[in-house]
Amino acid sequence: MKFPLLRYDLICLILFSSGIVLTHPRELQSADSPDVQNDQLGHSDAQKIKIIKNISYADTDNPRQQLDLFLPNTRMSDDPLPVIAFIHGGGWRKGSRRSGLQFLAPLVSTGKYLGVSIGYRLTDEATWPAQIYDCKAAIRWLRANAKTYHADPAKIIAVGTSAGGHLVAMLGTSGDVPTLEGKIGTSLNSSSRVCGVIDFFGPTNLTNMGGFHNNPDSPESLLLGGPLLEQKEVAMAASPIHYCSKDDPPFLIIHGTDDKLVPFDQSSQLHKSLQDAGVSTRLIAIEGGGHGRLQSKELASRIRLFLENQFSDSDHEISTQSIPSQSFSEDTGRN
């Protein structure tokens, strides 16, 4: 008897409900393997990128408070290059910055950008707001050390998937919130603001995710340091939607309409709150898409246009028409 294959996000939902976290094989591999970046690079990209690993941004020996830099061997310009900062997912309790190269390599290899993949403390080590403290410290470090790597400190876009999407959305909306800055690292005089955000299916309003997210052992409850339903004030304080204001940078939000882990409505709520605040925001729905970052030429093209708009003062029209999930490659990256 043959059994139908279950979708990855449905399997995750079943196991999440039982208090078990299923990590995608790529994420599991990237969590502990120091050489996974070399495996992720195709031969042509490997010839175009220099990787500087394990840079401490927090002035500590904690391996989770480190970042990896990706530099193009050949730059398209003599001017300082813009920076794309990637923050990984994993429910705030798994994952690794090693997974960032899959997204960054095609962009850095063009010679137009620098890439950085940021690690942060997970919930087995620290609860909120440690995660955003770490991410802001990493952005401050980047800005303070921009001259060393011939980077443009005024042009940093943050990109994140799932839990990383939550953190980059928080970077975008809380740039004017001193209580979320923290005191980590030695670059405290530098700004942690970013000039744009690309949020892949990140939680944005922890107070109304519902379902298994309300369980005492859910990823959100572990992040907050206690059962979500008993931590409503902390949940609000940890929600990017709570901080939307007119000075936030432009957002590009990407989410599958059939996501069983992070409801599509989470992105809809953020999009509307940003619009109401007068912020430039675009929401691209992946029709029938689940929880995962898929490979698509159309989506990649829209992302590149967004980067050019923010980095090069271009004024490209970016379509927000939904993209059918069937048009995506089967080679998925659920990081």
Image (cartoon, rainbow, N blue to C red):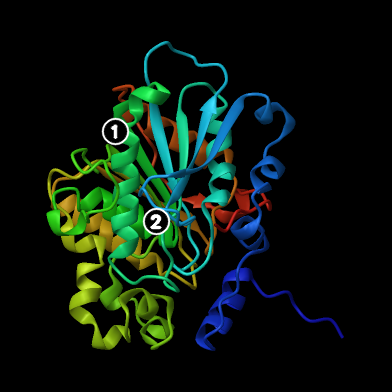
Q: Is residue 92 above or below residue 215?
A: above
x, y percent for residue 228: 30, 83
Q: Nearer the viewer, residue 155 or 306?
A: 155
Answer with mark 1 or mark 2, whichever residue precedes in sequence.
1
What residue does disc 1 label? 144
x, y percent for residue 236: 21, 72
What residue does disc 2 label? 165
x, y percent for residue 62: 45, 57
Asked if residue 316 can be seen in this view, the reply is no
Instruction: Name the residue rendered at 36%, 85% in the picture.
Output: 214
267 left or right of 298 in image = left
7 left or right of 311 in image = right
Asked if residue 235 can be seen in this view, the reply is yes
x, y percent for residue 3: 78, 81
Crowding at mark 1 (Cα within 10 Å: few <14, some 14-19, many 20+): some
Q: Is residue 197 above or below residue 10?
A: above
Instruction: Name the residue rendered at 28%, 50% in the picture.
Output: 171
**Between tags 1 and 2, which lies in front?**
1
